[in-house]
C-alpha cells in the first residue's frame, strides 16, 4: 500500500490527536488551560460550581498535576470569584495526601492546603479507595474532606448542577480491577 500525506490528512490527524489527548485526560502543562475550563471562562455564564476530577492508578499523578490544578482553579476564580470549586481525588493518587506523606509530598500538601484556605476550594478523597489500604479519615490532614465514595461525591455535585472537569479518569475496567485486585496497584498495609 502506498499512503500519500496531504495537507488535509495531516490536519485531520493533528485534530484527531488533540481530541484524543483532551478526551483521555492526558496531562496538560500549567501554562495550558483545560478545554472545558476555557469553554466555561469564555461562556460568560457562571456555573453553579466546578469539580475537578482525578482518578488514576498512578501514585504520583496528584503530585504531578498539583500545579496544573492550581492554575485551573486560579483561572476559574479570576473569572468567577464566587463560584464553588472542588477537587475530587478517587484513585490511588489520593494516597499522596495522607498525613504520613506530608514530608515526601510537601509541595502537594502546601498547594492543596492553600487552595482550601485561601481560595475556598473543597478537596475530597475517596473512602472506598482509602479503605483498600486500611486508611481512614484520621489518616488525612484537616484540609482534606473524606468522602465515603468519590463517585458518590461527584454524583452529589452533579445533582447540584456543578460542571465536572475530568483531569484524569479510570475506565470501568480499570476501576473494577482496582477493587478486585488492589494488590496489583497499591502496596497494601
Image (tube, helix red, strand yellow):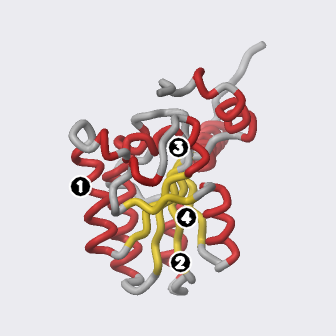
Task: Tell me if residue 81 comes above or below residue 20 in the rendering.
Answer: below
Q: Are marks 3 and 4 in contact (CB under 8 Å)?
A: no
Q: Nearer the viewer, mark 4 or mark 1?
A: 1
Name, please, the residue furthest toward the right: 1
Q: Earlier in the sequence, mark 2 or mark 3?
A: 2
Q: Which residue is mark 2?
A: 49
Front residue (pair 1, 85): 85
Q: Is residue 4 above or below residue 19?
A: above
The x, y position of residue 187, in whole percent, is: 48, 24
Q: Earlier in the sequence, mark 3 or mark 4?
A: 4
Q: Give left or right: position of 112 versus 159.
A: left
Give the mark, 1 or 3, whose residue is nearer the N terminus.
1
Question: What residue do we see at 37% from left, 47% from top?
Answer: 97
Q: Which residue is mark 3?
A: 130
Q: CA distance from mark 1 to mark 3?
A: 21 Å
Query: Do the CB atoms of the residues marked 4 and 1 lie less than 8 Å apart?
Result: no
Amino acid at each position: 500500500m502506498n499512503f500519500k500525506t496531504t495537507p488535509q490528512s495531516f490536519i485531520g490527524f493533528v485534530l484527531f490527536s488533540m481530541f484524543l489527548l483532551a478526551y483521555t485526560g492526558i496531562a496538560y502543562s500549567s501554562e495550558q488551560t483545560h478545554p472545558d475550563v476555557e469553554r466555561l471562562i469564555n461562556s460568560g455564564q457562571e456555573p453553579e460550581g466546578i469539580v475537578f476530577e482525578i482518578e488514576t492508578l498512578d501514585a504520583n499523578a496528584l503530585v504531578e498535576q498539583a500545579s496544573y490544578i492550581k492554575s485551573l482553579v486560579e483561572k476559574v476564580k479570576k473569572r468567577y470569584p464566587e463560584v464553588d470549586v472542588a477537587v475530587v481525588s478517587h484513585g490511588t493518587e489520593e494516597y499522596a495526601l495522607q498525613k504520613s506523606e506530608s514530608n515526601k509530598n510537601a509541595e502537594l500538601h502546601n498547594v492543596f492546603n492553600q487552595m482550601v484556605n485561601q481560595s475556598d476550594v473543597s478537596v475530597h478523597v475517596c473512602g472506598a479507595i482509602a479503605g483498600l489500604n486500611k486508611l481512614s479519615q484520621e489518616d488525612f490532614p484537616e484540609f482534606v474532606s473524606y468522602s465515603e465514595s468519590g463517585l458518590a461525591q461527584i454524583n452529589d455535585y452533579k445533582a447540584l448542577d456543578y460542571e465536572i472537569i475530568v483531569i484524569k479518569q479510570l475506565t470501568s475496567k480499570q476501576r473494577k480491577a482496582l477493587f478486585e485486585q488492589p494488590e496489583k496497584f497499591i502496596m497494601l498495609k
